[in-house]
Amino acid sequence: MKARIIKPQNCLLPRRDRAGHKGDYGRLLLVAGSLGYTGAPVLAAQGALRTGAGLVFLGVPENVYPIVAVKCTCAMPFPLPEDCAALEKKAESCDAALIGPGLGQEEETRRMLLRFISRFAGPLVVDADGINALAGHIDILDGRQAPTVLTPHEGEFARLTGCALPVEDRKEAARAFAQAHRCVLVLKGSGTVTALPGGELFVNTTGNPGMASGGSGDVLAGMIAALLGQGFEAGWSAYTAVCLHGRAGDLAAQRLGEYAMTAQDLLDALPQAVKEAEVSQ
């Protein structure tokens, strides 16, 4: 099965219902952040909001909650409860979730991540430390019934699978993993590969080396989760978000150059990228 090349014209966003309200566009739960990584949850939440999420609830560890809360205007942050069951209860009212950005790899955090991945019944994006937690526990991924999207860079993919670096055949490695574990795999990097469980492959054409900086992946994870929360199919949500993310990076590079741009600049360019993708009214 050949890989499909994805360009912006392949990733159009449907017209919104003129009578739509915030409840129609997804209640999204994000679980992210830790000491030293307070930017990750904010960037992920902003990526989700700029991709149309109706409501974004952002759970962060209590010790960073004041820092994150002051940075959030439109997302709704809250301190993560000590009881994981309370978090799972909150997740029941959400349409999709994202778990992992900047959470860290402490043992208690890892146990929480694995429990959430196994018990959350809705569409889920697993990023960063969520992927690291799955290494050695792939059975938890295999046990999920709802759509699951994993977003590793090559280092995370190698930890998850035990393969050598660099990944020699990115397309076939991504395809094999997605098929074996019935998930959508977004293998990030130049020409990001999105593999679907049915064997379909999508190769992205947007983006540039200026996006290779901390926080860029957090924005992407939030974007994918936002589309999932709006009810779009998991594979489409993944490759569309990847394409729009890269387009935003190209717009930022046009304005600032590839050396100076940051994840915040990419985020600032995202509204234009999304606007270009909207089906004309």
Image (cartoon, grey):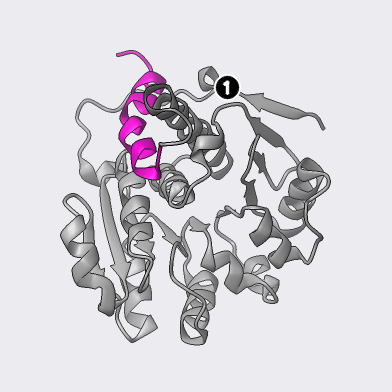
Q: In this view, does 156 lie to the left or right of 42?
A: right
Q: Position of residue 20 (x, y in %)?
A: 22, 34
Please tell me which residue is depicted at 46% across the width and 23% down the height of the picture: 12
Looking at the rendered image, the quarter that the C terminus falls into is: top left
In which quadrant will I find the N terminus? Answer: top right
Report if residue 277 lies within the magenta region: yes
Q: In which quarter of the image is residue 277?
A: top left
Graded by Cα atoms within 10 Å as few (under 14), some (14 to 19) or many (20 or more), the crowding at tag 1 reads some
Which of 205/16 is in front? 205
Q: In this view, does 122 lie above or below 231?
A: below
Residue 81 picture location, percent across and down: 29, 81
Q: In this rendering, does residue 50 appear at all?
A: yes
Q: What element carries label 1?
A: loop
Q: Compare residues 231 and 177 and report the one nearer the observer.
A: 177
The percent position of residue 28, horizontal first and vertical second, equals: 34, 55
Main secondary structure of the magenta stretch: helix
Residue 111, image x, y percentages = 51, 83
* Residue at the spot of label 1: 7
Highlighted magenta segment, given as a residue range? 261-281
Q: What residue sits 81% from the left and 60% below the top? A: 164
Q: Is residue 187 above or below residue 41?
A: above
Q: In this view, does 24 lie to the left or right of 181?
A: left
Query: Looking at the image, which residue is at 69% across and 70% down?
Result: 138
Toward the top, the furthest residue is: 280
123 lies left or right of 193? left
The three-letter code of the residue at mark 1 reads Lys
- Farthest residue, direction front: 259
Q: Judge from the rendering whether residue 197 lies leftward or rightward of residue 248; answer left or right.
A: right
- Residue 256 is one of the magenta-drawn residues: no
